[in-house]
Structures are given as structure tokens and as C-alpha cells.
Amino acid sequence: MIKEVIVVEGRDDITAVKRAVDAEMIAVGGFGINSKIISKIKEAQKRRGVIVLTDPDFAGEKIRSIISKRVKGIKHARISQSEGTKNGDIGVENASPESIIRALNNAKCETQKKTYEFTIEDMLFFKLVGNSEAKKRRDLVGNELGIGYSNGAQFLSRLNNFGISKEELINAVNTVNRRYYDEGI
């Protein structure tokens, strides 16, 4: 049983998560997040902690952002777009139990105080911006780190906001390089 309450978008997501783990869940019903739902999430955060697991798309990120602004200290779990896509449909409901478990195990909490551990120079060095493979590399490295895919600026912000260490980034990049590019740093 997962200690935290898992917040998902809808009923189909609840079904998918229940196939993977035993946990209490709250479905927000898409963009229709009202004050009643936020109150439930705040109460769950206070009592047990919360992990937000939304779809790996624009709507999912928007919902995650709304919750994150209103409820502090929550953890974020992410599945990759490839893990959540089936027949052109994208969502947590399409992810395998293994992908959901991996995402929950890699859930990250935003730090209250933003760090500036990483810079654009790091992003360039690790080939996460500034080349034709950058988008794919951000997706793969973000998946390894559990911070998901994002554009270059968002990725840099996530590295700093989720307290990722240089060592963690190097390990993730090396894993991706070995797995997909047959090289290491």
C-alpha cells in the first residue's frame, strides 16, 4: 500500500493505477478543479502526503500546475509520453502497471527554495539543448530522473526546483547514453 494519496485526472486513471498499486486516490475531473477538490487534496497532503500523477500532455501539466500552486509540498510522479500513448490516445490510463510503479517510485517533491545548481551551460554540455537530438534526450533523461519531458527552459527549471544533484543528472545522462547512444560521459 502506498502511504500517500495519489491524485489523478479521472476514473480511467484510477483504474490504471489500481492495476499497479494499492493506494487511495482522488480524481480531479480534468480542468474542473474546484475549491472542494483542492480542499480534499490539502487535507490528504496534511494527513498522508500527496503524489500527483497526471497525463503527460499539456492538460496534465496545467492541472499539475494548478494543484502545485495551491497545495505545497506535494510530490510529482510522471510517466513519459511514450509510456502513456496507445493508439494515438495519451494518458495515464494507457500506461502499464510497471510504468506507473516506476513513476511513483521516482516521485519528486518541489523544493521550497529554488536552487541554481544547473545553468544553460550544463544543458548545452549534456546535449539537452542546442542540437537536433536535444528534444529526444530531454525526454529520455527526464524519464530517467522522474521529472518528465519539457522544453529546455522548463527542464532547467525542473532540475533546479526538484533538487536534482549533479551526480543524479550525470548518472541519468550516462544511462541514456549507454542505452540509446552507446556512449558515456
Image (cartoon, helix red, strand yellow):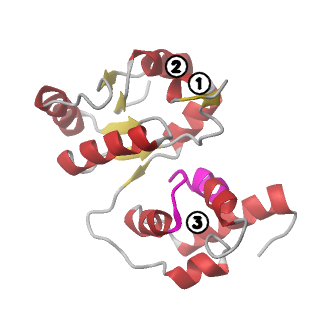
Q: Considering the image in quadrants, where does the N terminus appear?
A: top left
Q: Which residue lies furthest to the right in this view?
A: 182
Query: Which residue carries the number 1 mark?
Result: 94
Question: In the rendering, at what x and y percent does residue 135 appear?
Answer: 64, 60
Mark 1 or mark 3, earlier in chain: 1
- C-beta proximity under 8 Å, tags 2 and 3: no
Labelled disc at residue 16: 2
Q: In the displayed structure, would residue 48 be above or below residue 178?
A: above
Could you give the CA–CA distance between mark 2 and mark 3, rounded to whole angstroms? Answer: 29 Å
Question: Hey, what amino acid is under mark 2?
Answer: Ala
Q: How crowded is mark 1: few (under 14 residues within 10 Å), some or many (20 or more)?
A: many
Contact between marks 2 and 1 (CB within 8 A): the answer is yes
Cα distance in 3D space between marks 2 and 1: 7 Å
Q: Residue visible at 43% across and 36% down?
A: 53
At label 3, which amino acid type do we have? Glu
**Relative to residue 2, is residue 97 drawn left or right?**
right
From the viewer's side, name the closer residue of 121 and 71: 121
Residue marked by disc 3:
168
Count neighbours of disc 3 (C-alpha within 10 A) and say few if under 14, some if 14 to 19, many if 20 or more.
Answer: some
